Amino acid sequence: MPGMLLLHADEGEACARWRKQGRAYWQDAFSLVLEKYGYLAVEQRTRRDVSQHQWESYDCVLVCQLPAGDWDDDLISWTKDGSRPVLLEAPFPPALLAQLGVEAHGVSAGADGTLRLLDTELRDRSAAFGYPGGGHVAAGSGRPVARLSELDWRSIPAVGLTETHAQRWKCPGWDLERWSLTDGATAKPEILADFTLHGDCAAPQPAVVRHGLMTAMALSLTAFLGQGHTSHPSDPGEHFSSGRRTGVETAVLALVDDLHARAGASRARVLPWPRGATWARSVRHDYDRQITVDHAEKVLSLHDREGSAATWYWRSRHIELERRPGGRGRQLVSPIELVAAHARSEVALHTELLWIEAARERALVEQAIGCEVAGSSAHGDPGCFRFQGAPNVLWAEREGLLYTEMIEHAHFHPHRFAAVDADGRVEASRVLCLPHHESLDRSSAPGDTNAHDVLEAAGRWQQMSGFLQVMNHPDIHTEELFEVLRAMSSAGRLDLTSREAADWWRASHDGTQLMLSAAADERFEIRSMPGVNQMVLEIRQADGTIRTRVVDIEPGGSVAVSARAVTPSI
């Protein structure tokens, strides 16, 4: 089968690493990075599942960090002497190091440093995704937040996690093998990227090198990026944040595209948004304080005028608000009813006492709006559960919600969550995590906004084809909000509620719902469980030519797309 093979360790190795090293095998979450960017024509296998015939049937291979026992003579031979371009993560056997022309000098676990692309072609390929390749590789840091001890997840048995589990979940799962070029080597490798350890006086070391059909990474970047799609259970009184990993993502995607090009093969990916759209925007209204019916009508009217869409995260304590005589066949109308009835708005759940009273909170909101909520976010008062990482997402997953927030990381696109169970197995969630919002409100004081920063950020979201959420509390800064919205570019923009964005993403970027596979004769076969309309498939041919096809698929149906087809106008 053509396409890319992703070779990773088996479940036994993942569980052994969890027990012996106290950390997870986050390479098992790297597929979430690929599917987030629409790379779905990838097949995952373990060493024991691959024969030489199967190895040679793929266009190219990405070998994640493997245990020493997986590197048998056959795998070494296929990698070193085979005809397939291979991208592999250290550490690997001396025979491969010698072939590459590098020497290893020990391993740094959870290395903190900066990755820099040196190769011009790779820099160009990464920048084509909207973000320059390279950047900081680090674990992130926590800051203290006020939280009642009885609301810490450790005090709530229903969460079902232990302190040991949480600390292993948190432990950085990537390594850096320290490399230098072999003295006197006949053929020197190409150094495609280097890495500078922070706090180390040594010069930058080779981080990505290439020799022949082998490209090798000293850093286990698939683990670093995979772990960027989870959020560990927080430490007591901690809010943890990780730096943006987008530049490292685009660097690795550039290496994946380089693999396909060196194989003389086309690669396909699903673009983020349907035909005619290049980015998406939504307003996130956190309903933290009561507003009157009149004010609710004003905000909704302004949304109608601007053409914007909004998701209102409602605290259940505010359900019983001021009511007044109204139409719609009801004697009384409340703000939540107005919002729920609005064509371009939805109501989601703003949780307060997650795992304690959240079921009751949800029931109150759903009773008020007459339907189920699709998503959740945490209210940030010190007397609330707040955001504690994995417990928030695990609750949304248990409740069968479509989406939730994950505000530890700074992604540009929705993605599935990587959870690790008590035995160390990493599994992908069904629930989607939405990108961190951009907050308009700096404080509740009149005029105290981040308007300039939000507008500046909008340009980055547009460049990355991302899903921008502008956060505003609907009782304040109403005029400022719509001034900012009006000032944003409308070119290629979709205005969506969070539910609409998540529905699209589930149908187009979830590998359990959309199956994309490479077939013979430069064809790609696509099967959709829910069906998709106006989905854009981007095909990058080996010579760098980009072709696009617009695809419609009925629920449960499939189509075949030729890489040689003429590009339609989109």
Image: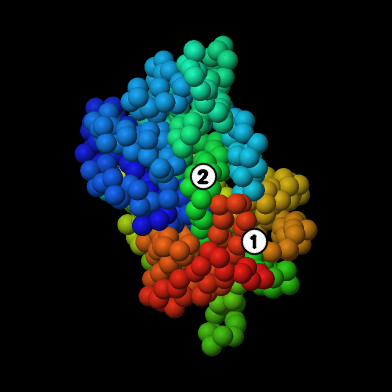
Disc 1, disc 2: CB below 8 Å?
no
Between the C-alphas of marks 1 and 2, the distance is: 29 Å
Q: Which residue is mark 2?
A: 262
| Tag 1: amino acid | Thr
Q: Nearer the viewer, mark 1 or mark 2?
A: 2
Q: Which mark is residue 278?
A: 1
Question: Would you place residue 337 above or below residue 360 in this image?
Answer: below
Mark 2 lies on a secondary structure that is helix
Query: Where is residue 148, by image quadrant?
Result: top left
Neighbor class of circle 1 (other Cα within 10 Å; few <14, some 14-19, many 20+) is many
Query: Which quarter of the rendered picture does the C terminus lie within?
Result: bottom right
Q: Is residue 71 left or right of residue 444?
A: left
Instruction: Give the class, few, some or many, for how many residues have Cα within 10 Å of label 2's Cα (few <14, many ≥20).
Output: some
SS class of the residue under badge 1? loop
Q: Nearer the viewer, residue 377 or 455?
A: 455
Image location (x, y in percent) of residue 12: 21, 39
The amino acid at mark 2 is: Arg
In the image, 287 versus 122, the foreground residue is: 122
Tell me if residue 400 can be seen: yes
**Residue 507 coordinates in the image, percent (x, y):** 46, 66
Outermost residue, front direction?
A: 186
Q: Is residue 372 visible?
A: no
